[in-house]
Image (spheres, rainbow, N blue to C red):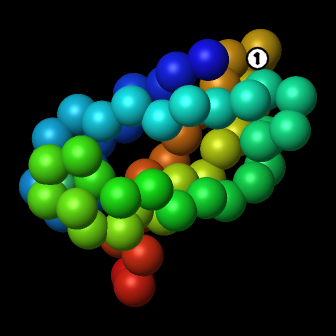
Amino acid sequence: MFISFECPYCMTPNTAEVDPDNDIDQQMIQDCEICCQPIELFITESDQKIYVEAKQEWE
Ligand SMILES: [Zn+2]
């Protein structure tokens, strides 16, 4: 499934592909589609919904 999140550098909406069976409580790095900065994504699940927390990698 694809989840949208906002780039923490340039605030542009991005999408990440998340595998709900394997990616919950995992961290991944994805480069922003627009500014190409590395975004740290933390995947969580709550009430059967998947959430992505996006942070700057060096924060
Ligand atoms: Zn960006």
Residue 42: image x %, image y %? 61, 53
In the figure, residue 39 lies in which quadrant? bottom left
Count all numbered tags in the image, as a single digit. Answer: 1
Which residue is rendered at x = 56% and y = 31% of the image? Answer: 17
* On screen, residue 8 above or below 51: below
In the figure, residue 22 lies in which quadrant? top right
Q: Quadrant of ligand 1?
A: bottom left
Specify whether 27 is left or right of 2.
Answer: right
Residue 14: image x %, image y %? 30, 36
Residue ID for mark 1:
47
The furthest residue to the bottom? 58
Q: From the Cβ of disc 1, is ligand 1 less than 8 Å away?
A: no
The furthest residue to the right? 21
Which residue is rendered at x = 53% and y = 54% of the image? Answer: 41
Q: 32 or 6: nearer the eye?
A: 32
Quarter holding the N terminus is top right
Q: Residues within 10 Å of mark 1 (few under 14, many from 20)?
A: few
Residue 24: image x %, image y %? 79, 40
Residue 27: image x %, image y %? 67, 59
Disc 1 is placed on an element classified as loop
Q: Amino acid at mark 1?
A: Asp
Which residue is rendered at x = 76% and y = 17% of the image? Answer: 47
Quarter holding the C terminus is bottom left
Which residue is rendered at x = 75% and y = 54% of the image? Answer: 26
